[in-house]
Amino acid sequence: MGKVRQADIARVAGVSQATVSVVLGGNRTGVRLSEQTKLRVLEAAERLGYVPDPVSSRLAATRNNLLGVYTFTPAFPDIADVYYPILAGVEAEAAALGKDLIMFTASSAAPDRIRRTRLADGCLFLGRHVPVDAIADLLAAAFPIVHIGRRTELGGRIPHVGADYVSASAEVITRLARAGHTRVRYLREPDDAPSSGDRERGVRAAAAGAGLSVAVTRTPGPELDAATIARWLADGVTALVVEETDTGAVFQATWRALHEAGVSVPGDVSLAVLGRPPAGTAGPVISGFEVPRRALGRAAVRLLASLVEPGSGEPSPHRLLTCPPVAGETIATVA
Amino acid sequence: MGKVRQADIARVAGVSQATVSVVLGGNRTGVRLSEQTKLRVLEAAERLGYVPDPVSSRLAATRNNLLGVYTFTPAFPDIADVYYPILAGVEAEAAALGKDLIMFTASSAAPDRIRRTRLADGCLFLGRHVPVDAIADLLAAAFPIVHIGRRTELGGRIPHVGADYVSASAEVITRLARAGHTRVRYLREPDDAPSSGDRERGVRAAAAGAGLSVAVTRTPGPELDAATIARWLADGVTALVVEETDTGAVFQATWRALHEAGVSVPGDVSLAVLGRPPAGTAGPVISGFEVPRRALGRAAVRLLASLVEPGSGEPSPHRLLTCPPVAGETIATVA
DNA sequence: TCAATGGAGTAATACGTATTAGTATGGTCG
DNA sequence: CGACCATACTAATACGTATTACTCCATTGA
């Protein structure tokens, strides 16, 4: 079987394996070599069809240009909208940096698969929730990791690249206030991921500043149906603000309920989403903001790369990207 | 930094590194060991938080439960429709088998990145075209590879899992013939990937069998505009058959031209696609067939896994999955 | 009492590359 | 003519795990 090693080249070129390694490695350590031998080695390597063994290189060099991507749910779920652009950004930036990606598939069968992340030089994490203790282990071992999405666990020591949901959500509320709304119903996810908490903080801060009253409903929970919607409107609510995260479930449920209630948007009630509704949804463009997912992916790779390869200045291990507003057509002015 | 090796465990447990390796490896070679030491080793490993180094394992054992995925274009292009379901299938099956994935990002900057595939136990290839010589090298080295999509290069020696475009395309033509069509215009991609050639063979065979006349246009090429469409209709063409591949460009162009020409479908002309138009396209459901992309991904992983791990019967290295027909609403009956 | 047997574990080595300390050779200078 | 210095290269070793041949010791049987 035609497996060619450096030792084979060495024999042919009449030098030692070490010399071959030095020559093929571009002589980065400044070893003195004559042009003659360099050429002989290169020619022999060419003739024999040498292919470096990446595994061995990694073992010897403790660097392999591999970045891990660990997702806590399948990386390719049925709903493509959320992860896809992030992964696209990750891939693009990784390719630009000459790194390859290892996708660690989180199967419930092997929960300690997370340890395999160490195969890579560093690892990206992606998901609404995070296995804190496993991450803590990696962190303690000084293994470079970056989480995509802000994380507050472990005293904020997890490096991350996230979206600035606080500001973006506040801006949406401000927009509603400027349009004259004073009573708003806010529908959010039931669990407490940082992305949800950030949105709520933005909403509350802006509402307080604008003298606007916000009532929160966690959903699914108390059933979100036509009757509920009707009751809210009767109570004087003029706008709904809906959190939009991974699954799209909250928005879907709201939209359906509005439809069943025969409520027109934005005629009878204004609607804003803290994010974007799933693509392909029919109807008007919903007001809200864009989550710069592709940019998140790129920025995360850049941060991880800089953690793997220190020097050239340590960047801040936390970064928040701004979410550009989407004007949309679903916020009406109130008299 | 707290990197724990087998040697550390050995010291703590008072045994040799070899013993640790044997114990942790499940003693597959039948070394005699007492329960006592086995327990001591396992306990020490647990206490120290041992994590096996996959790189070293691979170097020593030439197996690491890593499958490569090599795409010749970005794996996450703007058009998500084509690769996404395939990758989803790949991921699902890999997770089911307990394997992780390495995505090799093909950047034009480093064309010999393909060599890095050897880091994995085997590699999946994915793309309309293929770098034949690189593949030939891998094949010659007995490195397990599977191409997703039928390949005829290298005398058909490339293992692959593909879709049976021949039969599916023939079935579409047969459907048109049964509906009374006799003159058909066939629009196909300009280049000669196997998937395009297969469709054309299916079309021609079925047309010959049904006594149906088919004229081929490669597009983009002669401009596909309203005037051209009108001319075809004047010539007695009653149906268009459009190839649909990765980009969706051919279908898009055709659909636009039909629209500009003010031609109604299927009122004025029937329309069939050899595949599926991009999701999210408005309008009627186009007649054609489904490409079982997710199943392709799964089958490819299974085949690759069996090549990596021989025994349990060598399966055929070539497999074609059938494409279920989509009835659609764009084939009308001709008097 | 000596060979034979079997149990328990280890020493040695392989895997292929990268790095570093060191050697050998020939020339230069005072 | 020995000290000194480049030059050109190599020996040795590390990386962490897997495998195999081998050693050591305690029984057993005749």
Image (spheres, coloured by chain):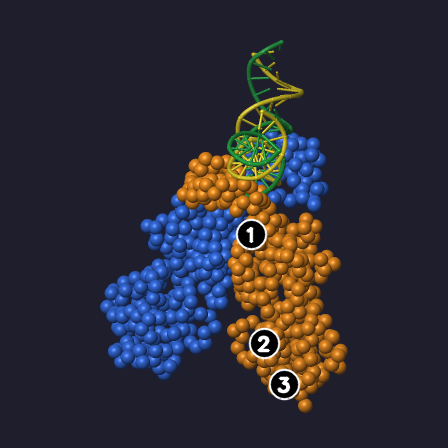
Chain colours: A blue, B orange, C yellow, D green
Do marks 3 and 2 both belong to one polypeptide chain? yes
User: What residue sits 60% from the left and 80% below the top?
Assistant: B327
- Label 3 Cα crowd, 10 Å radius (few <14 / some 14-19 / many 20+): some
- Label 1 Cα crowd, 10 Å radius (few <14 / some 14-19 / many 20+): some
Q: What residue is pinned by disc 2?
A: B256
- The numbered dot on residue B332 is 3
User: What residue sits 71% from the left and 57% below the top?
Assistant: B157
**Of A272 and B84, the residue lying toward us:** B84
- Disc 1 or disc 3, which is closer to the eye? 1
Do marks 1 and 3 both belong to one polypeptide chain? yes
Q: Is residue A89 visible?
A: no
What type is the residue that disc 3 sits on?
Answer: Ala
Mark earlier in primary sequence (1, 3): 1
Q: Chain of mark 3?
A: B
Kind of element beneath mark 1: loop
- Disc 2 or disc 1, which is closer to the eye? 1
Kind of element beneath mark 2: helix
In the displayed structure, does residue B277 sit left or right of residue A203? Answer: right
Give the x, y percent position of residue A245: 40, 65
Mark earlier in primary sequence (2, 1): 1
**Of A198 and B215, the residue lying toward us:** A198
**Residue D19: quadrant of the picture:** top right
In this rendering, is residue B332 above or below B133?
below
- The numbered dot on residue B65 is 1
Distance of label 2 from label 1 (alpha carbons): 47 Å
Give the x, y percent position of residue A190: 34, 66
Pointer 1 with pointer 3, Cβ within 8 A: no
User: What residue sits 49% from the left and 41% below the top?
Assistant: B34
